[in-house]
Image (spheres, rainbow, N blue to C red):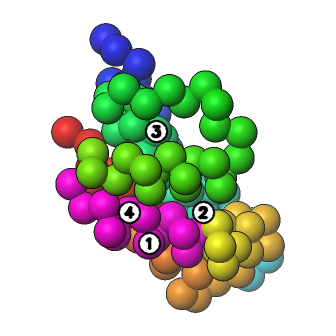
């Protein structure tokens, strides 16, 4: 099993964890607990997307060794967008995550609403890139 395939498994597992936690959020009545669960779900959704992006890049022959931060990953994604089924969506959603700081606002502060939905949609779009 190649490294790209292992990354596919990680992406799907992160997504499943996030989805299960989101179900817990729906059932939870305590707002403080909901906020904390939302942070965990968002972090897992975000990393589901990252693993999927890196899997596609890796399968395309791109070295991931030099990725040191999200901006560097975005640069590589933009340079290699032709390797994605829906490059415009993936690039735009990833830019939203890092340029507008949605990831931090949800995953570290627990903000709700459209930002959380955007993080989930980022993961969903990225996972569509996997076999």
Label 4 or label 2, whichever comes before in sequence order? 2
Of 89 and 61, the residue lying toward us: 61
Q: Is residue 93 above or below residue 1?
A: below
Q: Is residue 31 toward the left or the right of residue 92 in the image?
A: right
Where is mark 3, residue-wise?
A: 54
Marks 1/4 in contact by CB < 8 Å: the verdict is yes
Q: What residue do we see at 70% from left, 47% from top?
A: 69
Label 4 or label 3, whichever comes before in sequence order? 3
- Distance from disc 2 to disc 3, alpha carbons, whole Å, reads 18 Å
Q: Secondary structure at mark 3?
A: helix
Where is mark 4, residue-wise?
A: 90
Circle 1 packing at 10 Å, graded few (<14), some (14-19), many (20+), is some
Instruction: Give the quadrant of residue 33.
Output: bottom right
Of 53 and 27, the residue lying toward us: 53
The N terminus - image quarter: top left
Between label 2 and label 3, give the one nearer the viewer. Answer: 3
Circle 3 packing at 10 Å, graded few (<14), some (14-19), many (20+), is many
- Distance from disc 4 to disc 2, alpha carbons, whole Å, reads 17 Å
Where is mark 2, residue-wise?
A: 42
């Amino acid at each position: 099993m190649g490294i790209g395939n292992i990354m596919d498994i990680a992406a799907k597992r992160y997504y499943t964890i996030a989805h299960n936690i989101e179900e817990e959020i729906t059932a939870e009545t305590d707002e403080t607990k909901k906020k904390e669960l939302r942070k965990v779900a968002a972090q897992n959704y975000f990393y589901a997307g990252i693993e999927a992006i890196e899997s596609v890049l890796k399968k395309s022959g791109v070295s991931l060794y030099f990725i040191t931060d999200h901006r560097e990953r975005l640069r590589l994604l933009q340079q290699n967008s032709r390797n994605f089924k829906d490059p415009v969506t993936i690039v735009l959603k990833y830019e939203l995550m890092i340029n507008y700081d949605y990831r931090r606002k949800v995953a570290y502060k627990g903000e709700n609403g459209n930002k959380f939905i955007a993080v989930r949609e980022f993961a969903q779009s990225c996972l569509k890139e996997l076999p």
